[in-house]
Image (tube, rainbow, N blue to C red):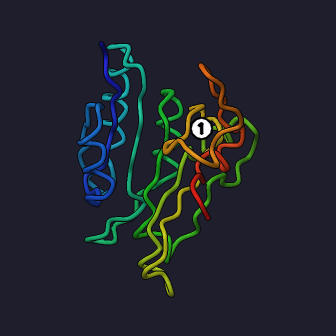
Amino acid sequence: EQRPVVFVGPYEHHSNLLPWRDSTADVVQVGEAVGGGPDLVQLEALLLAAKAEQRPLLVGAFSAASNVTGLLTDVDAVTLLLHRHDALALWDYASAAPYLPVQMNPPAADAARAALLAKDAIFFSPHKLAGGPQTPGVLVFKKKLARRGASAAPGGGTIFFVGREEHVYLKSAEEREEGGTP
């Protein structure tokens, strides 16, 4: 059975690298371009190879900025390339959020380009923001990624109906993931 492929950049924070290594996906590191950032020529070749292998899911999970060097990634160029090859574009903004605009849907000339530039998910830990230490992380993602009907932690508050042999979870993904006693 073919496994998903996750492409990561040349300078990923451990929080964006290690969970993928522990997943069932094959993790492929994209090299660094001469001017810095992920090598887009290599990334495209890797995307084409994965598509030729008919991998079930292609994911790009990149840092918007290096937490070591501060080097910025051209998030729009990488997102555009990923989407042109039907890959998801997931962005770690932990080192970028305090300094750069965080745009899930950046402005574009037309609707087709807007769809290609829209990130599928953005996540960051606000510990690097003013007032951020001891605060929870931030995850913003497109509804199309919330396809799972079950809760990640099923139980009270996540369910609509429970019968002898069947059960139905709440339709709202937000409510479905906020189970437990308040």
Q: Looking at the image, which residue sits at the far front?
A: 164
**Above or below: residue 8 compared with residue 124:** above
121, 82: nearer the viewer? 121
- Horizontally, is 73 left or right of 138 in the view? left
**Above or below: residue 56 compared with residue 43:** above
137, 173: nearer the viewer? 173
- Horizontally, is 34 left or right of 132 in the view? left
Residue 71 at x, y percent in the picture: 34, 67
The quadrant in which residue 49 appears is top left
- Horizontally, is 83 left or right of 6 in the view? right
Pointer 1 residue: 146
Residue depicted at 61% across the width and 38% down the height: 116
Q: Amino acid at mark 1?
A: Ala
| Quadrant including the N terminus | top left
Mark 1 Cα-neighbour bin, 10 Å: few <14, some 14–19, many ≥20: few
- Horizontally, is 102 left or right of 82 in the view? right
| Quadrant including the C terminus | bottom right
Residue 70 at x, y percent in the picture: 34, 71
Dot 1 falls on a residue whose secondary structure is loop
Residue depicted at 53% across the width and 40% down the height: 80
Residue depicted at 66% across the width and 29% down the height: 168
